[in-house]
Amino acid sequence: MTSTGDGREGTGRDGPWWWERRRGAVLDVGLGVASAVECAFEGVPTAREAGVPVWAGVLFGALVGSTLVLRRCRPVAVVLVGIAVTPATMGFLLGVVGLYTLAAYEVSRRVLATLAAMSLAGTFVVTYVQTRGDVEADGTLVIVLSVFMAVALTVPPVLLGLYVGARRRLMESLQERADSLERELSLLADRAEERAEWARQEERTRIAREMHDVVAHRVSLMVVHAAALQAVAAKDPVKAVRNAALVGDMGRQALTELREMLGVLRAPEKQPAVREVSAPAAPEEGPTLGELEALVGQSRAAGMTVEVLVQGEGGGYRPEVEQTAYRVVQEALTNCHKHAPGARVVVRLAHREGEVAMQVENGPCEGEARGADLPSGGNGLLGMRERVVGLGGVFVSGPTDGGGFKVSAVLPAR
């Protein structure tokens, strides 16, 4: 049931029968009692004029007036009762409150106009008849007085009901929009939290890849050199000293890169709130393809046979493209140290129009060459694939027909 908009509507329902609120039931019962008392008093002269017992007029008036209790569930019926008893000059409160309630309800405007016109006409006729019989005046004054009484008892309650109903509908619309906005804000907050979590996860993954590339490659070379140092320490002291120096250089380089990475992680205490939900930051400035020859030189110093083939001229690549290309070659060389010690390795780098391609291929292990028992976490190929695909490139890896292994990647230049 729609509320009449006179301050009694609510979100919860705690009233009996057709009332939404308990205070609405109390108000309607009070109005019904007042209307019953009024109609009962007005029923006394009506009964005398009709020649019926007074108690019958009082009872009839009380029953008529008490129908106002039904104004919320049966507003049309209440107005019809008020119109019906208009000739008996009773039901003033019943007619006024009934018309107000009918106008405040969301009923058909045609029904409202019809009932309001009937009430207006009934009040005009009754007032005209009574005034013409009681007052000795000209017809114009009687008509004006009758019109005034009819309009005063009909138009104000209808206009007030229309205003209250329109205001209630406006408030309901505003409340609905506020609820909708609150739901949208809640959804946006949930999405922002999801994006923040996704951004944090992406950042952790990126940092983990960087840590893996730095530590795995440098430490792998250190282990290879340490194994060589152990093998030649007694036979060739000069080579042992050279290997020891290489191990120290590798350790210092690894520490330097780790310090740089940890420096990136030391973010300021106060960051803008928007940054937390934005996409992961681009990789910090790191190694470039210009340092590829030095990277290959470290593997050669560890005893690996590495051939580098470069096609075309590079330059002008984005920092993340250069860093990813470098890391792919670095991780591929690390895997060669781990899984194919003593094998011949070929590094191919091709600068093409709009892209850069790289390939690291190793042949089968020669003779009885053995590695330094380097552990493998199984994350190298996965990390390379994530890096390349994240930049919109293509990554392929797998064994070759000759018994070796090949890693290939193509990165878009822009």
Image (tube, grey):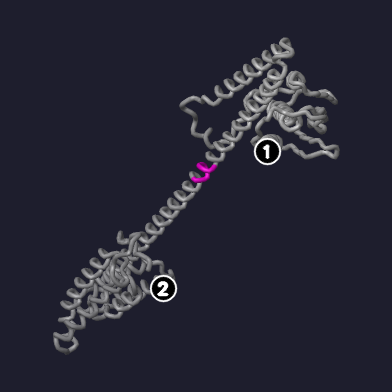
Question: At which x and y percent is residue 59?
Answer: 18, 83
SS class, disc 2: helix
Q: Which residues are magenta?
A: 190-194
Q: Quadrant of residue 154?
A: bottom left
Q: Compared with residue 50, is residue 196 higher up or lower down, i.e. above or below?
A: above
Q: Compared with residue 201, is residue 84 higher up or lower down, i.e. above or below?
A: below
Q: Mark 1 sits on what residue?
A: 382
Q: Amino acid at mark 1?
A: Leu
**In front of the other: 166 or 196:** 196
In the rendered structure, the answer to whether residue 329 lies left or right of residue 142 reads right
Q: Compared with residue 43, is residue 195 higher up or lower down, i.e. above or below?
A: above
In this view of the protein, can residue 144 be seen by the observer? no
11 magenta-colored: no
Q: Amino acid at mark 2?
A: Val
Q: CA distance from mark 1 to mark 2?
A: 75 Å
Question: At which x and y percent is residue 69?
Answer: 26, 73
Q: Earlier in the sequence, mark 1 or mark 2?
A: 2
Question: At which x and y percent is residue 160?
Answer: 33, 61
Q: Quadrant of residue 6?
A: bottom left
Q: Mark 2 sits on what residue?
A: 111
Farthest left residue? 54
| Residue at position x 32%, y 66% in the image | 20
Badge 2, how many Cα within 10 Å: few under 14, some, many 20+?
few
SS class, disc 1: helix
Marker disc for residue 297: none
Q: Compared with residue 121, is residue 217 higher up or lower down, i.e. above or below?
A: above
The C terminus lies in quadrant? top right
